[in-house]
């Protein structure tokens, strides 16, 4: 629970060191700009700024890096909404409904919704971290490969909801994505599907492949179109509509809370993080929504679910890093590197001896989230002008930036080659009505599924059932998964009966 003496110590630290506050705004702006550039990940943005923290004191340095983390977490949603390009892997689910909203001329509202969901998700995650940092760290220590496999299986259930009207094509695209995710050398030492290409030993580069499937393929399909939004009257940039989108997000507190909770829990699991949490939150929201059939066509609830989980994953990852000294992903690994540069080791001893610093970091993140709302409003207003740029200029510009971003990620020609190969593949899938999103989900989860299944097999000696019965957290995750599916089935049956009754009532009224 909260120790109030340490809380007052945190306020004293933040009040005595004005440098800690001076780095908030530059950190957020750097994060927003880097996050909005296709292919430039959160980790790269933080790594870019890491050397500068050598010349700062410890607290301002960590606050500066977490501000970049917060800004980049939302920045990735801007190209996801406007161009269908997830700026980061954690913004994949945002493209499912954000981009269709933009194509319908609702880009202002979609960006406002994404911003508000990110801000509230970030606030809620750090609020939960404030009260639950110790319990969360204890739970994370009890999670093994079987529990992570269960989380990945839950994520795979999203494939059914992404299949659209052709279930068989959706499942085929998903299985194809899983197979792509297993290319390379697995944890048992077996090599598959590399075709003798050395850089495929580590697997297909996920970010360039994802950008190719989701982004470049869409842009190639728009070559004969003049603008992203065909209706000229809908291309207007309206600050009031962006603010209206913020208010719209606030009208769905249940979706935001569920997304934030999923984000914190999944974000706390090392190696899983926001790339999975936004997909799980989107899937659960679609299952529980009465208008679930409209998801993927520009439903604002999909954007809210994805962005709230995406941003709240930051709090979960920070809990694992601070309490256990374990990086949940690349961004928290950069933060641990900053700890080491200042001769500080994260983990249980850090929390026990420096609770005032931990609380100071949490309170500074509250300030970051609030400041993000105002900085983000200005940022998305400027970014919205993309819809007024003719596609004959926009398409080549974005493809060039994406190519450079893919090269920056891999540090070799492997990134651009992967981007262009998957661009053609994605265009072909769109051309023949195969859901690209299902292949992306399979690609993201394939390696996670296989790796954790192999580790579970090695630990259990092949006795999956006996080992599973000894893992209460795995049983709980599978039980929650089954409960979710049962609720979805009951909800669909109830909606179908209600539709039939309404149809009968309408028929009776017309007959009379």
Image (cartoon, rainbow, N blue to C red):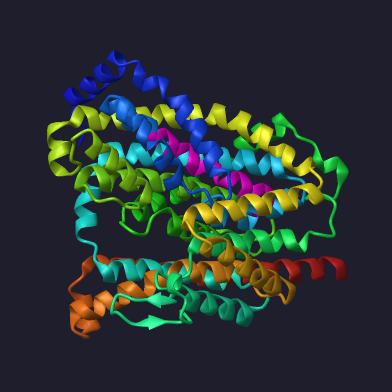
Q: Quadrant of the N terminus?
A: top left
Above or below 197: residue 72: above
Q: Residue at x 55, y 65 (%)?
A: 209
Which quarter of the figure is the C terminus placed in?
bottom right
Which secondary structure type mostly characterizes the magenta part of the structure? helix
Task: Quadrant for residue 85, please give it.
Answer: bottom right
Q: Position of residue 414 (x, y in %)?
A: 52, 65
Identify the residue shown where x is 68% and y is 50%. 398
Tell me if residue 251 can be seen: no
Asked whether 83 falls inside the magenta stretch, the response is yes
Could one spot residue 212 in this view of the protein?
Answer: yes
Answer whether residue 389 is magenta in the image.
no
Frontmost residue, 410 versus 90: 410
Tally of numbered tags: 0
128 to the left or right of 372: left
Q: Position of residue 332 (x, y in %)?
A: 33, 46
**In the figure, is residue 204 to the left or right of 55?**
right
Place of residue 274 in the rendered image (x, y in percent of width and height, measured from the top left)? 43, 53
- Bounds of the magenta segment: 65-84
Q: Residue at x 73, y 77 (%)?
A: 432
């Amino acid at each position: 629970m909260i120790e109030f003496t340490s809380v007052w110590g945190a306020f004293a630290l933040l009040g005595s060191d004005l440098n800690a506050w001076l780095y908030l705004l530059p950190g957020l702006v750097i994060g927003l700009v880097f996050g909005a550039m296709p292919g430039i990940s959160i980790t790269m943005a933080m790594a870019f700024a890491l050397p500068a923290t050598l010349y700062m004191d410890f607290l301002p340095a960590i606050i500066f890096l977490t501000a970049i983390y917060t800004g980049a977490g939302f920045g990735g949603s801007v190209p996801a909404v406007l161009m269908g390009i997830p700026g980061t892997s954690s913004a994949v689910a945002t493209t499912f409904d954000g981009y269709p909203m933009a194509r319908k001329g609702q880009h202002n509202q979609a960006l406002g919704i994404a911003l508000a969901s990110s801000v509230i998700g970030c606030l809620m995650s750090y609020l939960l971290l404030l009260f639950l940092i110790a319990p969360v760290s204890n739970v994370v220590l009890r999670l093994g490969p079987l529990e992570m496999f269960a989380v990945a299986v839950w994520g795979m259930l999203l494939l059914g909801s992404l299949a659209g009207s052709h279930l068989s094509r959706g499942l085929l695209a998903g299985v194809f994505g899983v197979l792509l995710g297993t290319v390379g050398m697995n944890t048992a030492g077996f090599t598959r599907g590399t075709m003798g290409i050395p850089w495929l030993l580590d697997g297909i580069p996920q970010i360039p492949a994802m950008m190719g499937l989701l982004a470049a393929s869409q842009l190639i399909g728009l070559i004969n179109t003049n603008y992203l939004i065909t209706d000229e009257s809908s291309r207007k940039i309206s600050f009031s509509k962006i603010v209206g989108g913020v208010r719209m997000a606030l009208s769905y507190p249940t979706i935001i809370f569920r997304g934030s909770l999923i984000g914190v829990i999944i974000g706390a699991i090392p190696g899983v993080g926001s790339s999975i949490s936004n997909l799980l939150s989107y899937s659960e929201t679609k299952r529980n929504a009465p208008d679930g059939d409209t998801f993927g066509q520009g439903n604002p609830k999909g954007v809210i679910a994805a962005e709230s989980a995406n941003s709240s994953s930051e709090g979960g990852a920070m809990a694992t890093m601070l309490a256990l000294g374990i990086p949940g992903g690349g961004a928290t690994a950069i933060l641990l590197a900053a700890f080491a540069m200042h001769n500080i080791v994260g983990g249980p001893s850090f929390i026990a001896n420096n609770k005032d610093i931990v609380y100071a970091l949490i309170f500074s993140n509250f300030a970051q989230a609030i400041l993000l709302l105002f900085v983000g409003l200005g940022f998305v207003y400027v970014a919205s002008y993309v819809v007024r740029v003719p596609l004959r200029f926009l398409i080549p510009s974005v493809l060039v930036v994406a190519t450079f971003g893919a090269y920056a990620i891999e540090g070799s020609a492997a990134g651009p080659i992967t981007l262009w190969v998957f661009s053609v593949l994605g265009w072909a899938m769109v051309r023949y009505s195969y859901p690209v999103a299902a292949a992306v989900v399979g690609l993201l989860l394939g390696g996670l599924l296989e790796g954790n299944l192999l580790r579970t097999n090695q630990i259990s000696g092949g006795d999956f059932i006996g080992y599973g019965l000894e893992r209460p957290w795995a049983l709980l995750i599978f039980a929650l998964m089954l409960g979710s599916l049962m609720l979805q089935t009951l909800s669909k049956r109830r909606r179908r009966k209600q539709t039939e009754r309404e149809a009968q009532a309408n028929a009776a009224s017309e007959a009379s």
